[in-house]
Amino acid sequence: MTNGTASIPSSFSSRATTCWEWAASPDSPLIRPVVMLNNGATAIREIVLNGKKLEEGRDYELGEVKKLEGSRTVIWLNFESQQKTIVELKTKQRIRP
């Protein structure tokens, strides 16, 4: 992690599922990450973390930032990890991570 941002080392997208992996470690832990998706009108159906379905309000929060250039969906994930973490984002339409 650099300056509060993390790169996404590997990801894939299908019609309605986007998946990515963070390589966290004890020396570089993942602490309550925030993900921003451009053109945020995408309807998020489900978020899965390491195979476990997350519950909105407890495990994550959603928001939207609107600007003249377009909108962004903001996803705040309420977890910490010191190991490889896989996130699956299931939506009603295809997105680009």
Image (spheres, helix red, strand yellow):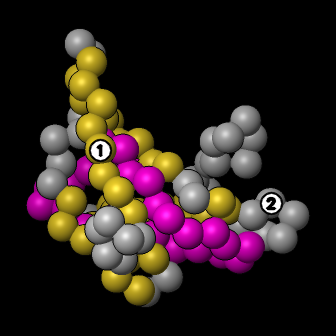
Residue at the spot of label 1: 63
Residue 16 visible in this rendered orientation of the protein: no
Magenta region, mostly helix, strand or loop? strand
Q: Is residue 76 magenta?
A: yes
Residue drawn at x 80%, y 60% is: 28
Residue drawn at x 41%, y 70% is: 59
- Give the image location of residue 8, x and y in percent: 57, 53
Residue 31 visible in this rendered orientation of the protein: yes
Q: Is residue 8 magenta?
A: no
Which amino acid is tagged 1?
Gly
Residue farthest along the top direction in this orientation:
68
Residue farthest along the bottom direction in this orientation:
51
42 left or right, relative to 23: left
Neighbour tally class for label 1: few under 14, some 14-19, many 20 plus, Cα within 10 Å: few
Residue extent of the magenta highlight: 73-97
Which amino acid is tagged 2?
Ser
Depicted 18 relative to depicted 33: above or below: below
